[in-house]
Each structure stands twice: as structure tokens, then as C-alpha cells.
């Protein structure tokens, strides 16, 4: 119960990382609010986890500052208090290259612009001592690969945003941290033995492995970690 009485908002929830994260946060005693633009998905997740603790949802797709402000104001209406943490897990992956920039706008929007809108809107809704978590990627901080131009540069920008935002929010006593996953593989399933699904050095790993690191970053045990992105790849980069 390391997050007992803490209120955490997860923006951009999927059936993978966001679902797994909500599960572990509830197990640690947090009050959880999940968000995406898909009402059916959110209801399914809430119904499957509500026996673990307090969880609610907000249906809103964040595409600009106005929609980001709506999500934050609705979260305050739901719990009648400020937040102790925000995790921004808006996803998306498009392969492209300099000759065919098909993913540029979507990748920059999902991994740079929308998270910044959310954080800007959230500052009035965060308690002192709260934590913001962003999701970069190993492709954004490690070696480059062909055909990942827009994805890699947007995730690299996410990693830099962690550092810049952390420096800006020091006086507000708000931490900003991130993780850089390798490859989050498959949907989350509560109560399964996910450790059998991977081994050290695998490029792909189930969402539980990444969600547990984020959960720890939100606890007081990680309160002296700030402005950094933690690689979470099981050593795959070492091959």
C-alpha cells in the first residue's frame, strides 16, 4: 500500500500498459482515474478492476489545450481534490523515413504536443510533491534504426522534455520522470504469471514489466529521482 490515499490520473489508457498500470496502482492503494477517447474500453477496464479499489474514468481524447483542461477539471470533479500523480501514456507507432514522412504529424502530436498540453493544464491540479511520468522509448535514447524517423525523434523529444520540465517545476516541488521501454508486447491480463512470457535480453516484454517500474516511480521510495528517463528493456540493448 505504498500509494495509499494518493490520486493518480492515467491519460491515454490502452489495453496494454495503461490497463496494467491501473491494476498495480490499485493494488498499492491509489485512487485511479483512467482516460482515453474509447468509452467501451474504459468501462471494461473499470469493471474488471473495481473490486481492487477506487477507479473511475473520463472519456475525452486530448488533442489540444482545451481538451486537456477538460480532462483535468473532470478529474477534480470526480475526486474533489488535487492529484498526486499523472502518467501520460498516449501511444502510437508509425514507421517512416526521410523520403516518406507519413508519421511525422501523428508522432509529434502523440508523443510531444499532447503530453505538453496535459502538463500545462495539470499544474493547477497537482499537489506539492506530486509526480509526472512520461513514456519515451529505447529508440528515442539508444541507437537509431532505419524506418523509425518520426517515431524516434518524437520519443527523443519526450526524453528531453522530462529534463526540461523537471527543471521548470523544481520550485513547485513537482517531479518529472520517464521510462524508455523496449517493446511493450500484447494486452494486459490480470493475475497471470507474466514472468513466464519473457526472459532477460528479450526485445519484447509484457506490459506488467513496464507498469511496475512506473508504479515504483510514483511512490515515495523514488522521491529523489527527478528529471531522468530510465531504460526498461531487460538488457536487450546489450545484445
Image (cartoon, rainbow, N blue to C red):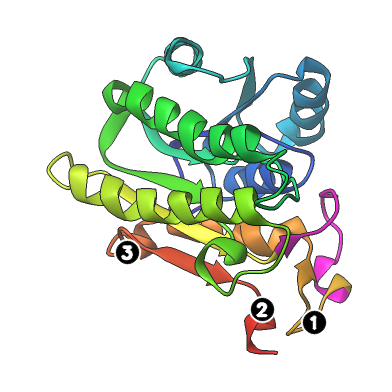
Q: In the figure, 208 relative to 30: above or below?
A: below
Q: Earlier in the sequence, mark 2 or mark 1?
A: 1
- Report if residue 3 is visible in the image: no
Q: In the figure, 171 relative to 140: above or below?
A: above
Give the quarter of the image for residue 116. top left
Q: In the figure, 22 relative to 227: above or below?
A: above
For marks 2 and 1, give the CA distance.
8 Å
Q: Position of residue 53 (x, y in %)?
A: 63, 35
Give left or right: position of 186 versus 35.
right
Q: Position of residue 204 (x, y in %)?
A: 79, 68
Q: Where are the magenta residues, as a range?
A: 183-196
For marks 3 and 1, give the CA distance.
27 Å
Nearer to me, 68 or 109: 109
Secondary structure of the residue carrying numbered label 1: loop
Residue on which the image places disc 3: 225
Give the quarter of the image for residue 117. top left
Secondary structure of the residue carrying numbered label 3: loop
Residue on which the image places disc 1: 199
Give left or right: position of 18 versus 228.
right
Cβ atoms at labels 2 and 1 below 8 Å apart: yes
For marks 2 and 3, give the CA distance.
20 Å
Give left or right: position of 168 versus 152.
left
**Looking at the image, which residue is at 70% across and 90% down?**
239
Q: Earlier in the sequence, mark 3 or mark 1?
A: 1
Q: Is the stretch drawn in magenta largely helix, strand or loop?
A: loop
Q: Position of residue 81 (x, y in %)?
A: 36, 20
Mark 2 neighbour class, 10 Å CA radius: few under 14, some 14 to 19, many 20 or more: some
Residue mark closest to the camera, 2 vs 3: 2
Residue on which the image places disc 2: 234
Give left or right: position of 35 versus 73.
right
Amino acid at each position: 500500500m505504498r500509494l495509499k490515499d494518493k490520486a493518480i490520473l492515467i491519460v491515454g489508457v490502452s489495453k496494454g500498459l495503461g490497463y496494467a498500470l491501473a491494476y498495480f496502482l490499485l493494488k498499492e492503494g491509489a485512487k485511479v482515474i483512467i482516460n482515453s477517447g474509447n468509452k467501451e474500453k474504459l468501462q471494461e477496464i473499470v469493471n474488471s478492476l473495481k473490486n481492487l479499489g477506487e477507479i473511475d474514468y473520463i472519456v475525452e481524447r486530448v488533442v489540444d489545450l482545451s481538451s486537456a483542461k477538460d480532462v483535468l477539471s473532470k478529474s477534480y470533479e470526480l475526486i474533489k481534490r488535487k492529484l498526486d500523480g499523472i502518467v501520460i501514456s498516449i501511444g502510437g507507432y508509425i514507421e517512416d523515413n526521410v523520403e516518406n514522412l507519413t508519421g511525422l504529424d501523428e508522432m509529434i502530436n502523440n508523443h510531444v504536443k499532447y503530453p505538453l498540453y496535459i502538463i500545462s493544464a495539470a499544474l493547477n491540479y497537482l499537489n506539492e510533491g506530486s509526480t509526472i511520468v512520461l513514456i519515451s522509448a529505447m529508440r528515442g535514447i539508444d541507437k537509431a534504426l532505419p524506418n523509425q524517423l518520426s517515431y524516434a525523434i518524437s520519443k527523443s523529444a519526450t526524453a528531453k522534455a522530462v529534463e526540461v520540465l523537471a527543471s521548470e517545476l523544481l520550485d513547485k516541488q513537482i517531479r518529472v520522470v520517464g521510462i524508455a521501454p523496449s517493446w511493450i508486447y500484447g494486452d494486459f491480463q490480470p493475475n497471470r504469471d507474466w514472468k513466464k512470457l519473457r526472459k532477460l535480453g528479450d526485445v519484447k516484454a509484457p506490459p506488467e514489466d513496464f507498469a511496475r517500474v512506473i508504479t515504483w516511480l510514483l511512490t515515495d521510495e523514488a522521491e529523489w529521482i527527478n528529471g531522468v528517463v530510465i531504460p526498461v528493456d531487460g538488457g536487450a540493448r546489450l545484445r
